[in-house]
Amino acid sequence: MNIIFLGAPGVGKGTYTSRVKEKYGIPHISTGDIFRENIKNNTSLGKEAKSYMDAGKLVPDEVTINMVKERFKQPDAKKGYILDGFPRTIPQAEALSSFSKVDVVINFVAKDSTIIQRLSGRRICRKCQAIFHVKNIPPKVEGICDKCGGEIYQREDDKPEAIKHRLKVYSDQTSPLIDYYKKKNLLHVIDANSNEVESIIKNLVVILDKFNKKSA
Ligand code: AMP
C-alpha cells in the first residue's frame, strides 16, 4: 500500500506514521528525517540542505526528488510506503507519479493555533527521532528520550521565526497538492485538532484498512 500523508508542518504526521507503519508492515519515508540524518553525518547533501532547512525554506525540487528516487531503490520500499513530507510541491508530485503509483492520500487538518502550539512545544530525540511535546507528550525524565535514552532537543526550524516561514511556504507551495490529489480522487481528510492521538489513529485506520484490502 502506497500512502502519502499531507498536512501542515506540526499537524502530527510523524506521530501518526510511527503508530501505523508496523500495523501495515511498510516503511516510513520522511524527507525531513533523511535530510536531518545527512546533516548529522555531514554529507554533501546535508551541507546543501542545511541552510534551506534552518530558514524554514524548501530544499530545491531536483535535490529532493533525486534523494527520494534513491530511497525508493531500497528493498523495503517495494512493500509500499508512508510518505511524510513528500511531495511538497506540484513538480515533486508529478515526479513521484512517474516512478510510483500512489494508492491513497490522507490530508490531516488542524487550526493554525493548534499547529503553532504543537510546533513550538515539539521536541525530538537526537538518536532515534522519537517525537515528544513539552505539554502533550512529555518524556518521563526531562531532556531524555523514553525509548532509547538519547538527548531530546528542539529543532532549529521549530523556533518562532522559522515556524512562521514554514507555515507560509506550506500555504503557498504545498496546499495546492490538496486540489491536485482531490482531482485524482485519492484524497481523504482527517480532523487532527484533537490532542487525543488515539481518536485520530482510529479514524485513520478505518480509511487505511479499506485500501489495504484492495491492494492485498
Ligand atoms: P519536515 O521534517 O518534514 O518538517 O521537513 C523539515 C525541512 O526539510 C523542511 O522545512 C524543508 O526545508 C526540508 N524538506 C523536507 N521535505 C522536503 C520536500 N519534500 N521538499 C523540499 N524540502 C523539504
Image (cartoon, rainbow, N blue to C red):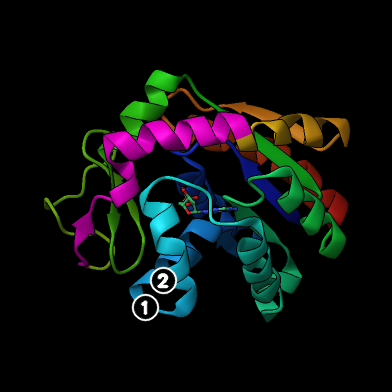
For the record, the magenta segment spans 149-172
Quarter of the view holding residue 26: bottom right
Image coords of residue 195 (percent x, y):
39, 28
Assess whether mark 1 and mark 2 are in contact (beta carbons under 8 angstroms): yes
Is 21 positioned to the left or the right of 153 in the image? right
The residue tagged with tag 2: helix, strand or loop? helix
The residue tagged with tag 1: helix, strand or loop? loop
| Mark 2 CB near ligand 1 (8 Å cut) | no
Tell me the residue at 71%/70% (across/down): 69
Question: What residue did someone put label 2 on?
Answer: 47
Task: Report the disc number at residue 158.
Answer: none
Question: What residue did someone put label 1 on?
Answer: 42
Estimate the spatial distance between the alpha carbons at disc 2 and disc 1, rounded to whole Å: 6 Å
**Principal SS element in the magenta part?**
helix
Residue type at mark 1: give it: Asn
Tell me the residue at 76%/57% (across/down): 1
Image coords of residue 80 (percent x, y):
73, 63
